[in-house]
Amino acid sequence: MKIKKNDFVEIEFTGKANNEIFDTTNKKEAKKMGLQADVKPVVVSVGNQMLLKGFDDSLEGKEIDKKYSIHLLPEQAFGKRNPSLIKTMSMKIFRDKDMNPVQGMTLQLDNYIAKVLSVSGGRVIVDFNNPLAGKEIDYDFKILKKIEDNSKKVNALQDFFFKKRFDFEIKEKDKKVIFNEQKIKPLIQMFSPKFKDIIGFEFVVEEKKKQ
């Protein structure tokens, strides 16, 4: 059985740049890297940018339980390096944030990961490019299985787009996924058209019926 667009699959992969692993869902590889987190395969919907575009594009037509490798150019992966993302900043900005920048340091500034290229006097040159920008990427991967259960599909969408899971009910006959938490209504309304294209169900928020 070949995988097609919008299929949900459980996939195991290891990503490398310059022969060094930067991401893996393989427990053995994670153990070698000393990662203590609960590393496990992920569930994604094919063709819906839940992986790097070049990686995602390669999944259509692949078969379950076969090993594959793919090589991605920078424009298919994390993009080319952008010189305009290298900024000269005043040391005062860092002092005000109780930071002491040194060359080679990686830090978080305004929700962006940045690398300090040099520190000279009162000036700090910082690179806001993704650390993997401009690099060619290799992935080794295997599609473990196709996901048919709609609850698992909904949770996969929540994990990727919301980074959190909310309780829901699926009405198969009505083709609806119903949430009860009113606070996420704007979020559901925003993503509902996309989710309907992917999974074929309407996502809505309804008030709980009083007993």
Image (tube, rainbow, N blue to C red):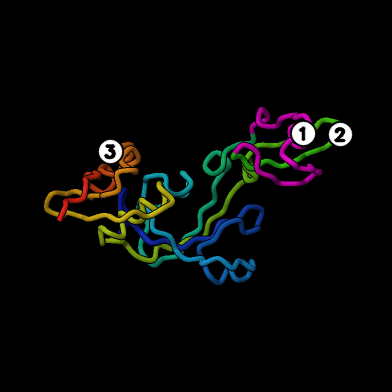
Residue at position x 66%, y 53% in the image: 18
**Residue 32 placement: quadrant:** bottom right
For the residues labelled 3 and 2, the Cα–Cα distance comes to 50 Å
Task: Name the residue: 29% across, 46% down.
Answer: 198
Secondary structure at badge 1 equals: strand
Residue 1 in the image: state x and y as whole percent.
29, 61
Left or right of 49 on screen, residue 101 = right
**First-in-chain label (1 vs 3):** 1
52 left or right, relative to 210: right
Q: Is residue 95 left or right of residue 209?
A: right
Q: Are marks 2 and 1 in contact (CB under 8 Å)?
A: yes
Badge 2 amino acid: Ser
- Position in image of residue 62 (x %, y %): 37, 57
- The residue to which callout 3 is attached is 193
Judging by the rendered image, the residue that carries numbered circle 2 is 120
Residue 62 lies, with reference to residue 117, above or below; the image says: below
Q: Which residues are magenta?
A: 82-110
Closest to the observer, 200 or 142:
200
Q: Is residue 125 left or right of residue 55?
A: right
Q: Nearer the viewer, residue 133 or 171?
A: 171
Secondary element at image label 3: helix
- For label 1, the residue is 125
Q: Earlier in the sequence, mark 2 or mark 1?
A: 2
